[in-house]
Amino acid sequence: MKELFNEYVKSIDTYIMFRIKQEAANLTPELEAKGRAPIALAMGAPVAPPPQFVYDKLTEALKTPQIHTYSTPKGEAFFLEAIAKRMKNRFGVELDPKTEIFSLIGSKEGLANFIRALINPTTNPAEQDVILVPDPGYASYTQMIKTSGGKSYGIPLTKADNYMPDMNKIWQKMLQDGINPAKVKAMVINYPSNPLGATCTKEYLKHIVDFCREKQIWLISDAAYCDIYFDENQKPHSVLEIEGAKDVAVEFYSFSKPYSMTGFRLGWVCGNADAVGAFGRLKSTIDTGLFKALQKCAAEVLNAKEGDDYIKAANKSFKEKQMIVINGFRELGWQIKDEDIPSATFYIWLPIPPRYKKSTDFTSDVLKTSGIVLVPGNAFGNNGEGFFRLSAVASDDQLKETINRLKQDGFVYNV
Ligand SMILES: Cc1ncc(COP(=O)(O)O)c(C=O)c1O
């Protein structure tokens, strides 16, 4: 068949996490034969089961008459109202469930379709719309922008400014790099951050809101990890807490990480009513909404004590896992200061040993030798080169086994 697929699709590869998974699967017989069966630390998917409460409510919901029929793309009223209640209790943010909230088939779908709703597709680089994305950042953003016919511009996140760059400086640099400011449609922020585990202050969120209001661009806040944190005094904020945020911002939420409901595919977007409305019109032409039984159990867990207790216990366990890994890498020679240990997310972001030139050289060596599945930092953007990401989501035993293998196989930092 002659090539009929569009330029955007032709230019992308399968998403990095699935490629890594496949590579590990291909190597499994060989690794098993030498006692190094793969330990999966690449995907950001908690392994613990979701709260039992969710299964109980789901089972109950399945018995409801007509539960099998189409929902609406927007979501059932009870689902949207439960979200509004959660946003009020967790952040003090008031939302109108009728106009300011929309259901998602997971936040990845929502982000992709929101980006699609913004970009006028073209393959001509000079004409392309631009979205600013964190670099390093969630690998999907750039791919979503590319397949929508736009281009991304990386906002460098560096330790020097605590991963909170001054956006006015970034804008100046962007102009010097020849980006047409009239083409910039939006910027994406993701705190707590994948892959860095970095958080930001409320003052910084205000800086971002003010910046987007001044530049008249949409602010897309990806809050997938807002409930994975380790310090009650430093709970991540919603950008919608900032005065004026609703003029420019939409925020994306997910049930995947806090409740370990990755496979349920549930999330929501909330914020500016015009943006939610435009997104909703697009969604209504390509999707018919979430299974009502899933909406039911999700709505219940959001405001239940069982849900909050689950999150607390999960965070305690993530912290323990984080410290198993951090202490393990310290023993292997990595210099990790206490203040650099993330206070949120289950990600650990470390430099590759200096003897390796590229991130992929290191992660590929570790996989082939020790069966440990990591993600090379460059998968998250140019600024990720020289680093790797580990998701501390496996069992404690597997994490300890990871460190033992790395020790036995000589993966120390400074050799
Ligand atoms: C930053 C970030 N945003 C969004 C997602 C998508 O999550 P989901 O589609 O499961 O809600 C992920 C998943 O890893 C992520 O890391």
Image (cartoon, rainbow, N blue to C red):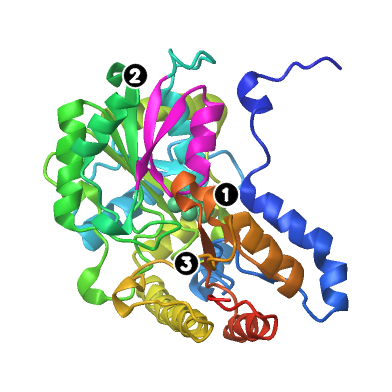
Q: Which amino acid does label 2 sit on?
A: Lys
Task: For marks 3 and 1, give the CA distance.
Answer: 47 Å
Q: Which amino acid does label 3 sit on?
A: Leu
Closer to the N terminus: mark 2 or mark 3?
2
For the point 57% across and 38% down, the residue is 70
- Taking the magenta stretch, the answer to whether it contains residue 329 is no
Q: Which amino acid does label 1 sit on?
A: Ile
Residue contact between numbered discs 2 and 3, judged by CB atoms under 8 Å: no
Task: For marks 2 and 3, give the CA distance.
Answer: 35 Å
Above or below 393: residue 292? above
Rendering quarter of residue 314: bottom left
**What residue sits right under mark 1 in the picture?**
67
**Is residue 72 in view from this perspective?**
no
Residue 182 in percent (x, y) is at: 29, 17
Which quarter of the rendered picture does the N terminus lie within?
Answer: top right
**What residue sits right under mark 2 in the picture?**
183
Magenta region: 129-156
Answer left or right for 254 relative to 63. left
Task: For marks 1 and 2, give the CA distance.
Answer: 44 Å
Of labels 2 and 3, the one closer to you: 3
